[in-house]
Amino acid sequence: MGRTDSLAKLAWAYGLHLARRRLTRPKSQLPALIEMYKASGIRPLTPAERELHPRLIGCINCGLCALAAGRLGKTRLPELASSYMRLYARLADASSDLEGDEADLEAASAACPVGLPLADVAAVVRRLAAG
Amino acid sequence: MTGAGIARDLSLRGLSVLLLEKGDWGAGTSGSSTWMIHGGPRYLEFDWDTTRRSSEDAGFIVTIARHMVYRVAFLLPILPHDRNNIERMETAMEVYDRFQPLKKSNPHVRLTADEARQAEPGLTSDLVGAVTLEEWGVDPHRLVFANVQDAVANGARAMNHTRVIELLRDGANVIGVRYRAADGSVSEARAKVVVNAAGPWVPEVSRMAGANVQLRPAKGIHIVYPYRISNFGLSAETVDGRDVLMVSHGGFTLLGTTDDDFYGDLDSVDVHGDEVDYLLQAFERIFPAIRNYRPVRTTTGVRPTLFKWRPYEDELSRRYQVIDHSSDGAEGFITIAGGKLSMYRLMAEETSDAVCRKLGHQAPCTTAVRPLPGSESELEPAAELGQRFGIPALAAIKLQSRHGSRAGDVLDKSDAGRIVCRCEPLTESELAYAARHEQVRTLADAFRRVGIAAGPCAGAACVMRSAEIIGRQLGWSASQRFDAVREFVQGSWLGRAPVLGDSGWAQEELAQGALRGLR
């Protein structure tokens, strides 16, 4: 009985939906979507970031980058590259972490055993942290 | 989860409660879930009442656990030959929108194919369009523990790693339990009512009382990626027409789940390569780059679904049942069976009502409105908290997601800033706190409580140090620390082996070097 009743109500809703689609002109809802989730940090990556993304999150936390960049023991990029890319929906709340001197990301990247493009990581992190 | 919810509910009603967990808090079905508090749009095909009740209770949970929940926005992409076309999918979402306000969620939007690819550029070009769906994410381990914490704060006793080995009887009455604690000692506890909230182990515990509760256990696996693949969750259709999800949580992605009848040993549930391929096959159609991402492990669990003959696993109801076993010759014994994480609070309330009826105790349930520990007040801005204790704002955000407004109490100012796990990031101070105050007895407990080894390195960089920190708090000797690491590495290997690709094996080599001799 429960299933029959549920399917009947869905069928009715389907009819109403089709009628409404015929009678109204659709408009773009993408801006509404972006606005709806802005506060939660749910924002799209750009196509270029998406293309690069599998490499951006490749950090295995060996710590060599921090040694090469002379930042061991401090708690910012590059040694937390993994954390920042993992939690990129919350970066707007962590923008204070990115203030101050930049580490030598070129040297850090050169030392990375998995070839993480740390300058690109930093660029994405900064863009997302800017809100 | 439900047991913790019942302990909280009953202790808040002023009753004396003992909660026993054979493993760790949330280590069973709850921890292996999709980590969502959701209303269940899938149930609209079967039973709108389950959707309504689930949405309503999700609304309560979102309110009482506000520091640990977050919005998960799904894109539901539609391909040309999908089982449901976009009009049918949007109809379902329009209906679901009626329930969304119950759980404080936003209504759906509809996107064209181009718009969907702007929202998620990784989607296939073979799209018709997409609709969105919003649910809530939660860390079930922390949700379970917050319930335990509150129960204890209200007078309950709660013991993990403690197994019930026998029910005590006096004729037709169940009058208590005999249990084996973590240290191997056996004790007894007398009670006027014993509640069996053992999830898929419900039949096993029921048999101790001579009662028969039949479930239809269903195994589900997830693939875990240790980062957000997309900011949006995604759905995909499997080769056999099921819907599966890619869910973006805080710093990781869950991809799943399977749903298969399970007849094996509940304490030893393996993940098979076929199950992993089944999920990847589904997502490759809508997100072609999925195989470029390196998973770190799998999870597996067994749903305690109520028994019904004939329906496919996916079509089984997620309803629950509170069973009074007095008619089975076990007076004072109650079982809660079935259900799902999103309705744990309601299940706990109804079970607690049954207990109170039995005891003639009159006290209202308050769990729908009373905040869980950490959700009592507004959170301090993460950057300020971080600055106060000398930790990165990101570490403060993670800390607050676990402890909410109590985050400041967790950090010891003297060594708060030292990071033990760079993936998470997690401070030494919080880990020590977990060992002192959160019943962490093993490294796996610490994984569940504070997320050690949850990141891309799978613990290679932090488990040894973590064992030292926990060991210092618990008085472990050097060999006990070593054994703890070995036990953790061996245990986590079972979940890692099914998903190691080329780069996974390369990293495994590195981990072997870091933890030489422990495998």
Image (cartoon, grey):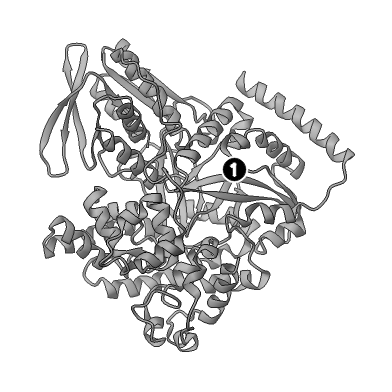
Q: Residue at x 56, y 68 (%)?
A: A129
Q: Quadrant of the N terminus of chain B?
A: top left
Count the numbered circles shown.
1
Q: What chain does mark 1 sit on?
A: B
Which corner quadrant of the image does residue B503 belong to?
Answer: bottom left
Q: Residue at x 30, y 55 (%)?
A: B410
Q: Which residue is mark 1?
A: B242
Closest to the observer, B492 or B248: B248
Q: Position of residue B214 (x, y in %)?
A: 38, 24
Q: Position of residue B53 (x, y in %)?
A: 54, 28
Can residue B324 be seen here? The reply is no
Closest to the observer, B361 or A109: B361
User: In the figure, is residue B36 to the left or right of B29?
Assistant: right
User: In the figure, is residue B258 to the left or right of B14?
Assistant: right
Closest to the observer, A19 or B434: B434
Q: Position of residue B514 (x, y in %)?
A: 28, 74
User: In the figure, is residue B112 to the left or right of B387?
Assistant: right
